[in-house]
Image (tube, rainbow, N blue to C red):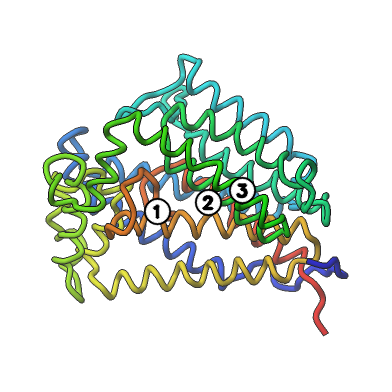
Amino acid sequence: MRRAREEVRPVAYDFRLLFPVLLLVGIGVVMVYSASSALALKKFGTEYYFLKKQAVFALIGSLALLICRYFPYRLLRSLTYPMVVLALGLLLAVQLSAWGVSAGGSTRWLRFNGISFQPSELARFSLIIFLGYSMSKKGDRLKDLYVGFLPHILVLGAFITLIILQPDFGSVVILGAITWIMLFVGGARIFHLSASLMLLVPFLYFYLIHAEYRLKRIMSFLDPWQYSTDEGYQIIHSLMAFGSGGIWGAGVGNGFQKLFYLPEPHTDFIFSVIGEELGLLGVLAILGLYGIILWRGISIARNSGDEFGSFLAFGMTLAIGLQVCINMGVTLGLLPTKGLALPFLSYGGTSLLMNMASIGILMNIYATGFKKTK
């Protein structure tokens, strides 16, 4: 990625990026209400509980997008290490402080005065900024083991160690994949990247065999109907939702699997509810919107006027794409079950906030860091 002369574009916003994002967020608010109304009524006495919170999250996320759009992305260089330290500190606080909150057998959240925050989302955001800054600074030295490879792996290792303690294997996979792919794109040696994967195999094996539920997840992925009452329950009802949706869908609000059959219908499995209520056409429309976002993100990365902007845009786009692929892969039975939100659609404030901030950074790169074209 070569440096080039820069210009401020006359258009303040990349509407080809902004419109799909806002449309997905709007669809997400509607589908979160549809997926969660029965659950909210039973647990909180009002069917609007999750709807109200998601609407607030959407407003806060839109504000984050706006702020990041006008915050010069180059200033993130000077914030790289403070953000890494902050993210590590918050991950430590999850385990060591009284603010750590447990749910579903995991401790992944911090709660201050009734406000919850998931530090692993900030960890992903901070890691991308660190990788973009470090890789752009080192240039051709990325091929050097001790300068261009190991420092990035050490920072990744610090994040992964704290996230595994939660445990949150889905976030570990995302962080590892982001680091590996960004280093590959940046020009790190294939031998170093391949060797790191080989060295990772024994740790993955140890991690799997020392938790029965993880082995069951792998086995239920291979044959969910054999484990239909426990680990395979989620994927079976997810597939039933897609199957009953047909081409046109049952209609918004008319889904059946969300009625206490499909666990977490408004978070990890909201794509299943979309498949049942909006059908194949709705699923294809969602895929098309994500496709436009990824296309615009890669275009911005390719045309950025400096390497930091290129790596940063690529990393932000890659993170969104990986989340989409893994979440959809899980709901369709193509990947083992992992707790991972679907960007812009799933219920959750931290995920929506960080993904909207990422879109704001992409639009700032678009507006201020594009190469001049002849």
Q: CA distance from mark 1 to mark 2?
A: 10 Å
Residue 298 higher or lower than 73, as above or below = below
Q: Is residue 118 visible?
A: yes
- Which label lies toward us, 1 or 3? 3
How far across and how far down the image is residue 285, in percent? 36, 73
SS of the residue at dot 2? helix
How far across and how far down the image is residue 160, in percent? 54, 35
Residue at the (67%, 50%) spot, across then down: 192
Would you say 197 lies left or right of 371 here?
left
Which numbered disc covers residue 66?
none
**Mark found first going from the N terminus, 1 or 3:** 3
Residue at the (60%, 66%) spot, across then down: 297
Residue at the (25%, 73%) spot, across then down: 280
Q: Amino acid at mark 3?
A: Ala
Residue linked to disc 3: 195
Q: Amino acid at mark 2?
A: Asn
Residue linked to disc 1: 342
